[in-house]
Amino acid sequence: MRYRAALAVFLASVLAVISAWAGRPLPAPTPVGRSISGQEAEAAHRAIEHPGERSLRAEAPSSARAHDLQLANEDVAAPETVTLSGVVVDAAGAPVADAVVAAIREETLKPARIVRTDVAGRFGVEIPSGTWALTATSERGTAAYWTSRSVDRPTEARIELGEAGFTLTGRVRLVGKPTGEVHVLAMRISDLMGDSFVVPLRADGSYRARLPAASGYLLTVLAEGAVSAPVLTEKSEDQTLDLEATFPGPPSAEVVAWVKKSAVPLAAVEAGHGFDDMRPLDALIGDARVVALGEATHGTREFFQMKHRMLEYLVEKKGFRLFAIEANQPEARKVNEYVLYGRGSAAEVLAGLYFWTWNTEEVLALIEWMRAYNAHSKHKDKVRFAGFDMQVTKVAWSNVAAYLEKVDPEYHKTLPPGLAVFGHIEASTAWTKLSAEERKSARAALDAVVARITERRDDYEKKSSAAEWADMLHDARIAQQAADMFEADATEGNVSGFNVRDRAMAENVGWLLDQEGPSAKIVLWAHNGHIAYEMKPFVSMGSHLAAEYGEQYLPIGFMFSEGSFQAIDWTGGDRRLREFTVGPPPEADVSTAFTRAGYPIAFLDLRTLPAGAVAAWFAGPRPMREIGAVFSGEAEMSSPTRLVDRFAAVIFVQKTTRARPNPPR
């Protein structure tokens, strides 16, 4: 699991999500790089004014609290405040007045302070001690970056605008009325921290920025209360990009009344409560073959419990027999052996999936339920457990190598040493250390292995079995998928890497269904960002599955209003796994319609929206709380969401608690 550059915070906070992180989950609570996860409507920290400067942004009061792994209730102590001051100059060394200077915490990418330089090019900001970067923009030169560093005492900075770069122009369409100043935020996709440039909006709604070349920029609108979908450019050439920002309000009485009438209230999130309250879901699920269950965080107890209950319902009432989670496919076979035959222990096989995100009491309870269901003598048709992810190649390649040694020992002896890269637990990192020629050679050798296993099918099956041959061929293909992702990340950027991963996960879901036969039905467990019909600028797993299975694909998003969850702390702390708590969201949040309807837990079919004001409200961009594996602040977790573009249905939980980690093994 890799967190690199801008798009990793985009996944942790778009997502995703995402996120998606989006979200990718982390195998250990020490992510590398930074995230954007895309929850794009940030209200900044309170700007502190200085003589000769204008303070440009103010932060809405935050209700977020952090607790450590022992679930302590004390708030985290505020760091000491220090002064970061300096001067902005042009390429000739002359002071630049009225330049926009942004102070950016390492963990967020979005500015905590925005100020203008005075007539002497001077600026100053009061900031909490920590790791900070500065950027400066002005029409007198190319935007510049003051490298991220620890600031724990009064510090002087000199920011020199450049000359080389490209010019970005465009217009911003504002839907609604902003309450303060509006800027364009250009977040550079790179391996640096905090290189996000703030561009002021002119009175006529246009903007102009001179930016340094990069592998890409993610642009969004920065304004109090704004909801703005990010726009990605991967070209460092003069271009025009138009943006849009909406300033949404709370749901109307008509919207709330429709939610109250149409949502299915659910009695509990826990499995074992029967299905009386879930009967209306029979028609809503219909003949779906792929039911995908999302999550707005990777660390919410009620989401995990509700997904367990949904699995119980789909198995008992709708005939589903295959469950697959966002975890590595080869490693998940050990879990399947446990749920089918009782081999090993549930806790041991769950820990073998690597990720802290799933190593919780709630997922353990789901696995134990699957085992109990299969152990019952009346259940002849067993429930199977699988993974559909492909990010870690160690087990996949070890399986393939051992298989070849068994069925084709002479060929095994000829395997090139370059294939050893796939045996690393951190193969993605090892891949980046190879030269382009070494990567090309390793990939060619891997392709040759796949071809060999394919061509020798009859012989290999005689020396093993048809099932083992199919698994080993697919393990080799998983290594290919991972290599594609490693290469895309290394050469094309994180958007391409995310897209390769989600395409591969969709392929693996299809492979799982093909192994089970044409009548097989599968329940998927993943982040909202992966199951969604769309998650621009990414191409999600859900988009591929929708294209393949049409109306038989049913993505169900999960959302909440307030409460607790666990995530990696990116708020300026030590990046440990912690519990976070957020209070009620702003009234414009999409969850407000559910909260005002009075349902603590509810299921809503978005395919039944009536034309008019209700459909328009749900079709418009609304803030929605969503993160992946990391939490960098309450404001960063709110993203512009059009629910109807992402999900067929949603499950709403009004107040949540933290998923409960299993004890270390």
Image: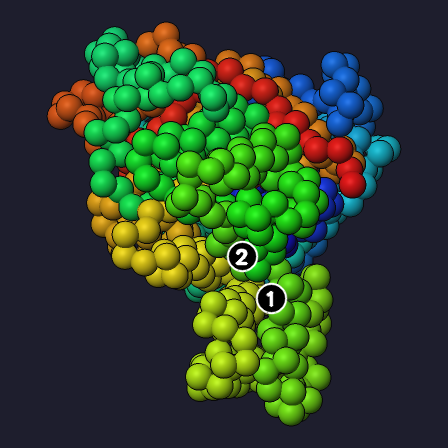
Image quarter (top left, top right, bottom left or bottom right) of the C terminus: top right
Image-based side of 642 in relation to 628, left or right: left
Q: Is residue 123 above or below residue 491?
A: above
Q: Residue at x 48, y 58 (%)?
A: 501
- For mark 2, give the secondary structure: helix
Please tell me how crowded label 1 is: few (under 14), some (14-19), or many (20+) other residues with Cα within 10 Å.
many
Dot 2 and dot 1 residues touching (CB under 8 Å): yes
C-alpha separation, residue under disc 2 versus residue under disc 1 = 8 Å
User: Is 91 or 332 nearer to us in this picture?
Assistant: 332
- Residue 535 image position (x, y, % from top left): 39, 45
Q: Is residue 79 above or below residue 191?
A: above
- Residue 17 image position (x, y, % from top left): 48, 42
User: Is 317 or 289 nearer to us in this picture?
Assistant: 317
Q: Which one is earlier in the sequence, the residue at label 2 or at label 1?
A: 2
Q: Which residue is mark 2?
A: 329
**Which amino acid does the dot numbered 1 rest on?**
Ala
- Residue 528 image position (x, y, % from top left): 44, 39
Image-based side of 562 in relation to 276, left or right: right
- Whether residue 13 is visible here, answered yes or no, is no
Residue 396 badge: 1
- Residue 511 image position (x, y, % from top left): 39, 61
Q: Residue at x 61, y 45 (%)?
A: 342
User: Is 361 or 375 nearer to us in this picture?
Assistant: 375
Q: Residue at x 33, y 16 (%)?
A: 277
Q: Is residue 191 above or below residue 105?
A: below
Please tell me how crowded label 2 is: few (under 14), some (14-19), or many (20+) other residues with Cα within 10 Å.
many
Residue 541 badge: none
**Which amino acid does the dot numbered 2 rest on?**
Gln
Q: Residue at x 25, y 28 (%)?
A: 282
The residue lying furthest to the front in this view is 377
- For mark 1, give the secondary structure: helix
